[in-house]
Image: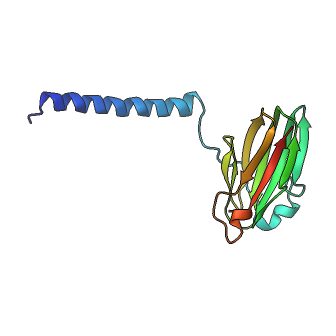
Amino acid sequence: MYIDRYERIWIIISAFVLIALFGVLLYSYYGQGIHLETNVGQVLPQDVPTTPPFDNPGLHEIGPDEYDLVMIAQAWAFNPREVTIPAGSTVHFKMTSTDVLHGFKILGTTVNSMVMPGQITRVTYRFREPGEYLFVCHEYCGAGHHVMSGVITVE
Ligand code: CUA
């Protein structure tokens, strides 16, 4: 079969790009350990109020400038919806939903996650700059979706 010289070159280049990108993928997974969080925990929606840590929602200091923030999402509010922390704090969010699929996005940060009934969501973020950080639900969850928000005050 005759293949034009330039066509052959481009076939080789595109095959090389595919192999290189696949190599990068393997390296990031096995070499750098970068992957989606899996199996971080489950809790039945009806058991949320009685299951630690969700039986005690809110901010809990666990070390110097380090906090656990246990948060429950339900139509159409976050509990707690207002939190105040000192600047430089590292916050470990532990979240779940008691009803439907919600989202959790903190504006101006890289925090952007889903909050699912039955599943526990864990996210860690360090708040370096003081300010008011609005967080919102970004998965449509019903009539009150647009009012489902809160604020983290970093001072
Ligand atoms: Cu909760 Cu949209």
100 displayed left or right of 54 = left
Locate the C terminus and report the quarter of the image it occupies: top right
Q: At x 86% / y 63%, what residue is drawn?
A: 49
Residue at point 74% right, 61% down?
148
Q: Can residue 41 be seen in this view?
A: no
The quadrant of the rendering that contains the N terminus is top left
Left or right, 19 with reference to 41: left
Answer with the quarter of the image where residue 36 lies.
top right
Residue 74 can be seen in this image: yes
Residue 129's spot in the image, x, y percent?
78, 33
The image quadrant that residue 143 belongs to is bottom right
Residue 139 location (% of width, % of height): 64, 60
Q: Name the colouring of the figure.
A: rainbow
Farthest left residue? 2
Please name whichever residue, 79 or 24, is drawn nearer the observer in this view of the structure: 79
- Residue 153, horizontal then vertical, whole percent: 84, 44
Give the residue drawn at x 76%, y 45%: 133
Say which residue appears at 54% left-offset and 31% top-offset: 28
Above or below: residue 144 compared with residue 23: below
8 over 145 or under it: above or below: above
Residue 70 to residue 109: above or below: below
Is residue 96 shown left or right of residue 30? Answer: right
In the foreground, 38 or 154:
154
Q: Nearer the viewer, residue 144 or 1?
A: 144
Tell which residue pokes out farthest to the front in this image: 131
